[in-house]
Image: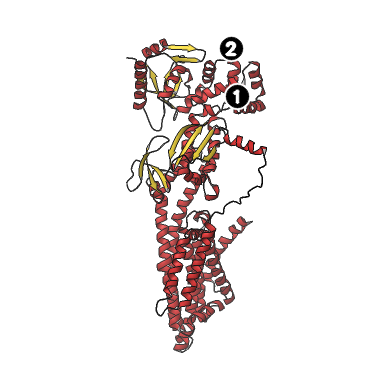
Amino acid sequence: MGRGIGKVAFPSAVVLIVVMMVIPLPDTVIDLLVAVNIATAILVLLMSISVSRALDFSSFPSLLLVLTLSRLGLNVSTTRAILSRGEAGAIIESFGSVVIAGSIVVGLVVFLIITVVQFIVVAQGSGRVAEVSARFTLDAMPGKQMAIDADLAAGILTDEEARTRRQEISDESDFYGAMDGASKFVKGDAIAGIIIVLVNLIGGFVIGVAMNGMSISDSINRYALLAVGDGLVSQIPALLLSVASGLIVTRSSSGTDLGSDVVSQLKRQWRTIGTSGWVVMALAIMPGMPRIPFIAIGLALVIISRRAKASEAVPLRDRVEPEEVVYNPNDVVNLTLESRVEPLEVDLSIDLVELADASGGGDLLDRMSGLRRKIALELGFVIPAIRTRDDSTLPSNTYAIRVHDVEVARGVVRPGRVLVIADDYTGLPGEDVIEPVFSLPARWVPNEFRAQAESLGATVVDRSALIITHLSEVVRRKASRLLSRSDVKMLVETVKQTDSTVTDELVAAGVTMSDVQRVLGALLEEGIPIRDLVRILEVLSEKGRSTKAVEPLVEAVRDALGPSISSMYARDGVLRAVTLEASLEKQLAEKLRVTESGSYLEIDSDLGSRLEGLIAQEIGSGSDKDKQTVIVCSGLLRPALSKHLRNVLPGTPVLAYHELGDHLTTDVVGVVSGS
């Protein structure tokens, strides 16, 4: 219904503006339109105060234009009525009578003061803010887009949330650009108001004396009253809309309305309020000063300060000392749960607990929930719930990530700062560090320089986002250790609901949950997702009839998933690869040893170091920050070579020739020589 009203109301308003300019209106209609004009301005002002961010009132620039044009159209109608009939409705005459109060000079001065305030102070200031905001918003778009991409990659945002955020950035840029243009209408409206008052004043005086036979004094009194009244009923709504425009363009996205923001921020400065109260009361002792107003205002400020201090203090929980200690078995259960080792934990130093406090604005826990969803879609299983707790033994501003109670990563975040990763840090003060996730040079920059960093196209990461990004990398590296037997059982049960034949064959082949867990864990350890679980189980049910050894089962699965695996590392249909020279492959094949637990390379330290150096050199020379390079070798050698390189060159994929999909183009960027 609201959408239908909007479709009719605004076209009707535009038509009415044209009607007001062309057709003379009776005084009753003029009074109604003047009242609507004032009421609309008040409504828009209150809405601009109530919204929590500028985009919540994104229609404001267009609405401002329509209201400005309607007010100018009303000015044309009232000017016609004043000059033709010497009347312009009861509201305009009442405004003029109250303001003039027997003195035309006073009335004109009041009108000019209101007009000057609106034009020079409010309209000029809000126009400048809109212009600067539009420029900075446009300059910051690339940095904000990169931040969204980083959050999306870290699992902090879903695809839908990322699309929404990108749309908000685009809408924000469009909004401030529109506000920059709309502010010009506000300034033009103020100038038009002054001209219209002069026309009514001078034209009315001439018409009254020359055409209506009025005396000079009667003509001045009559037309000055109407001119000032018309100017006021026009400029007061214009002033309200100018103030609303200023409030909108200076509004920050705090999540609450302006009044709540001001009150909450003032309450946090209760010391300053109290000091101000005592200073104001001290002014009362100055000679000639009226004591009562200063003392009353000072006391009020002191009282407000005391109440703000009391509300800021966090009340202690009620403590009840029991008369006797009663054994409660639930306490044992809770204690056992508290002491149990969790698969995945994030420990925070005491001063970082605020990041996990949702009531205080902390979003760390929400981001962890988003990360679990992201990892589930990426790897194919849901990681365990992430336990977050405070740790008084950690240094200030430090977090630690534990997997099965073993600390596997640690980092430091700086309060009041954001981490900036850029090629050029000119104009960005802060502390240079190596960020803990990818070991890239970075700088902790004060929060107030965030917009400047984004405008430079830098990647800007806040404290919570850094912790989540670090956690996501740990989860990907340790995914095989996080996959529990219960997770495997749940995955198999899910397949059973849709493909019961596959699970039945798995049971008939004698493949246990333990066998499935070991194979899935081995795949995850090499960075292979287990999303295509149906095909994985099909291979296990077939290959599992002849062997239960993990390595042959894993290689059989990789053979089936080969095209998908190679596609993971390709970009635009091209796979960048480094191969081994035939002589080197033959040399390594002679060093290959196969045992029940898997194959390995029995090579001395010299050959091992030379091999690792050569591979690292070839990968480095063909590296591209947007494309990953893989090692390609024979299927027989692949498991042992991958195992050997896993610790010295982590994250380097090793593929067999038969795993290369025929849908890809292989670009050989290097060959590791055996000599």
Percent position of residue 426, x then y: 32, 46
Mark 1 secondary-structure assignment: helix
Percent position of residue 194, x then y: 43, 73
- Residue in the picture at 65% in, 22% down: 503
Percent position of residue 19, x then y: 54, 68
Q: Amino acid at mark 1?
A: Val
Of badges 1 and 2, the one in the foreground is: 2
- Quadrant location, the C terminus: top left
Q: Which residue matches tag 1?
A: 534
Q: Is residue 99 above or below residue 673?
A: below
Residue 302 vs residue 375, the one in the foreground: 302
View extreme (top): residue: 590
View extreme (front): residue: 324
**Callout 1–callout 2 Cβ contact below 8 Å:** no
Q: Is residue 263 above or below residue 490?
A: below
- Residue in the picture at 53% in, 40% down: 389
Counting labels gives: 2
Report whether 39 appears left or right of 594. right
Rounded to the nearest whole Å, what is the CA distance between mark 1 and mark 2?
A: 20 Å
Q: Is residue 231 above or below residue 141?
A: below
Q: Earlier in the sequence, mark 1 or mark 2?
A: 1
Residue 506 vs residue 131, the one in the foreground: 506
Q: How is the image coloured?
A: secondary structure
- Quadrant location, the N terminus: bottom right
Q: Quadrant of residue 571?
A: top left
Q: Amino acid at mark 2?
A: Ser
From this viewpoint, is residue 148 visible? Answer: no
Q: Which residue matches tag 2?
A: 546
The local crowd at label 2, few if under 14, some if 14 to 19, many if 20 or more residues have their Cα within 10 Å, is few
